[in-house]
Amino acid sequence: MRLSDREWTVLDALWESGGATLGELTGALAERTEWNRNTVLTYLTRMEAKGLVSIDKDGSPRRYRAALSREQCRSEARRGFLESVYHGSAGDLVAAFLKDSSISREEKERLQKLLDDMEV
């Protein structure tokens, strides 16, 4: 599952709030976007259909929550990026990042420890 930038924006607001009504969410998003209430509702409805947002339909007003954790979404995004850009090769991904930027001695030691701990 790939999230659009706008879906990330909505989910960020939901993660930050821990859940919100449509009005609360529209207000929170107004600081970052120029979306009106109908636009936010459209995103929420589409995102519910994709399993990204849950809606508490018992209460009034309805409360919206992220159906997935931030880490679940980040993990999925990393996997998708790794597959689409590096054909699943984590080594190639790490090598490309290291080639394009330098790392400190401390970062190198942490990376080495991580690799050692993974028994790769």
Image (spheres, rainbow, N blue to C red):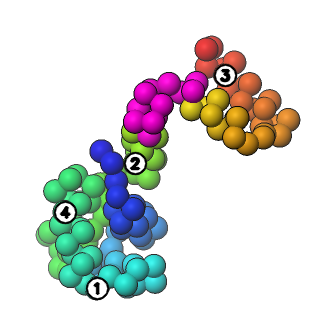
Which picture quadrant has residue 76?
Answer: top left
- Callout 3 touching callout 1 (CB < 8 Å): no
x, y percent for residue 87? 43, 27
The type of residue carrying mark 3 is Leu
Disc marking residue 46: 4
Disc marking residue 115: 3
Q: Mark 2 points at which residue?
A: 73
Q: Is residue 14 left or right of residue 110?
A: left
Closest to the observer, 92 or 35:
92
Closest to the observer, 80 or 115:
80
Give the SS element for disc 3.
helix
Give the CA distance from mark 3 to mark 1. Answer: 48 Å
Q: How crowded is mark 3: few (under 14 residues within 10 Å), some or many (20 or more)?
A: few
Q: Is residue 16 above or below residue 115?
A: below
The type of residue carrying mark 4 is Arg
Q: Mark 1 points at which residue?
A: 36
The type of residue carrying mark 2 is Cys
Over which residues does the magenta segment extend?
81-92
The type of residue carrying mark 1 is Asn
Residue at image x 78%, y 40%? 102
Front tag of 2 and 1: 1
Which badge, 2 or 3, is on the more N-terminal residue? 2
Q: In this view, does 45 lie above or below 28?
A: above
Closest to the observer, 110 or 60:
110
Which picture quadrant has residue 118?
Answer: top right
Residue 48 visible in the displayed image = yes
Closest to the observer, 83 or 105:
83
Give the SS element for disc 4.
helix
Which badge, 3 or 1, is on the more N-terminal residue? 1
